[in-house]
Image: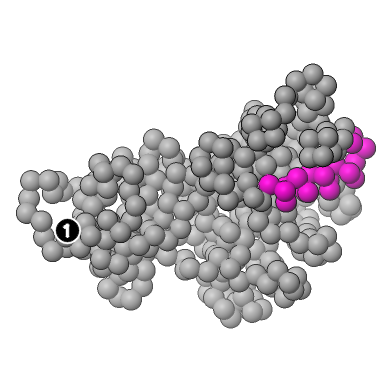
């Protein structure tokens, strides 16, 4: 990387400085480092520096910027401070997904020391953007393409490539619910009988989910992290259409329960479907997953009801975790928009807890906390 601190400012550098100023930076030193990095990589990729603008941000410290190229296309810049974000994991999982045949961004440039990355752009329309919430059936082709991508990902699974979704991680995630949702958001003292109820419930959840067959797990496989395919494919074209659905936000992938990502897709953090549609897509996933040998466990491959129960228990773990995460994002990180969706997750938790006798203590606890 060239050091521009002691050289004259070129027109290109001036354009980058101006464009970077249009993006909010909390750290002037990081802004200066970014200007130098972008000046270095822009010529090789024909980037129009003055076009730099925000693209999106997520719940982490990572954010994305969009920049035009002189051939009329666009690129994405990832700004991921290394003190907070693990860019190495992003690079590794992106390679695994490409090898599995998934449509993920290609990494064009990467500065690991500073956490700046130049990526190909998968477009501006997420799956969430094109979903019609009022007409579930109209969205079936789109969801089936998401299932296609998920099965490709799961089929590629190999041990030793990703961190294990083990008991320690499951329990750390579950602890977010009492620590952040109950104690800090609701002001509930998590002790005594309430603590014992949670511990006994968490023991059941962990035991059931650890028993499931293990595959690659995206860990946030939902419409906000999936990019809509070309319009022809979204309207009902085959999965062989060019590119197809894109996959983002995969850096936290692990090797864990086969039930996790389909539960994440159908019990979404920001969108709820009636159970008939959830069952419709889940059964279609189950039919293909068992044919591929992904469900060779107990009677899962022959009895959908058995697989559905396992999926609900996996979903319960995720819902408890996300309710805690949304509370933490609001109370610690100053992002209140997430907690507005917490009632959706409490509804998911109650819905599942009401179905299983072992979970009735959890349901009574929620009744008391939520009044």
Above or below: residue 267 compared with residue 362:
below
219 lies above or below 130: above
Q: Nearer the viewer, residue 157 or 196?
A: 196
Residue identifier under label 1: 13
As for residue 123 lying within the magenta part, the answer is: no
Instruction: Give the residue drawn at x 58%, y 59%.
Output: 224
Residue 253: x percent and y percent? 57, 45
Label 1: few (<14), some (14–19) or many (≥20) C-alpha neighbours in 10 Å: some
Toward the top, the furthest residue is: 192
Number of disc labels: 1
* The magenta stretch spans residue 349: yes
In the rendering, at what x and y percent does residue 140 appear?
Answer: 72, 71
Residue 117 screen position, x and y as percent: 35, 52
Q: Residue at x 42, y 43 (%)?
A: 87
Work out whether 254 lies above or below 36. Answer: above
Q: Which residues are magenta?
A: 342-360
Dot 1: what SS? helix
Instruction: Determine which quarter of the picture holds residue 46.
Output: bottom left
Rendered residue at 39%/53% (across/down): 78
């Amino acid at each position: 990387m060239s050091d521009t601190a002691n050289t004259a400012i070129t027109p290109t550098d001036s354009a980058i400085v101006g464009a970077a100023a249009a993006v909010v930076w909390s750290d002037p030193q990081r802004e200066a480092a970014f200007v130098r990095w972008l000046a270095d990589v822009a010529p090789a990729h024909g980037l129009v520096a003055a076009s730099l603008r925000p693209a999106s941000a997520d719940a982490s410290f990572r954010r994305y910027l969009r920049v035009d190229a002189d051939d009329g296309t666009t690129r994405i810049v990832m700004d991921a401070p290394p003190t907070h974000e693990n860019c190495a994991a992003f690079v590794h999982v992106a390679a695994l997904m490409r090898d599995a045949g998934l449509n993920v961004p290609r990494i064009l440039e990467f500065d690991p020391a500073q956490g700046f990355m130049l990526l190909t752009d998968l477009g501006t329309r997420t799956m969430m953007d094109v979903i019609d919430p009022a007409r579930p059936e109209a969205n079936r082709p789109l969801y089936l393409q998401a299932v296609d991508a998920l099965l490709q990902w799961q089929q590629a699974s190999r041990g030793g490539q990703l961190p294990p979704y083990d008991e320690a991680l499951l329990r750390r995630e579950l602890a977010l619910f009492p620590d952040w949702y109950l104690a800090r958001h609701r002001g509930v003292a998590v002790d005594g009988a309430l603590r014992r109820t949670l511990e006994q419930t968490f023991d059941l959840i962990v035991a059931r989910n650890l028993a499931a067959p293990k595959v690659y797990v995206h860990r946030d496989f939902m419409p906000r992290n999936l990019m809509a395919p070309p319009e022809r494919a979204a309207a009902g074209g085959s999965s062989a259409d060019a590119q197809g659905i894109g996959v983002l936000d995969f850096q936290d992938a692990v090797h864990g329960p086969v039930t996790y990502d389909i539960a994440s897709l159908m019990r979404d953090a920001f969108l709820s479907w009636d159970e008939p549609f959830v069952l419709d897509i889940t059964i279609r996933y189950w039919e293909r997953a068992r044919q591929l040998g992904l469900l060779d466990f107990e009677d899962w491959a022959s009895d959908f009801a058995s697989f559905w129960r396992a999926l609900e228990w996996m979903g319960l773990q995720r819902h408890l975790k996300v309710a805690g995460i949304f509370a933490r994002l609001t109370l610690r990180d100053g992002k209140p928009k997430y907690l507005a969706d917490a009632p959706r997750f409490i509804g998911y938790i109650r819905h599942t807890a009401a179905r299983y006798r072992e979970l009735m203590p959890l349901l009574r606890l929620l009744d008391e906390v939520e009044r």
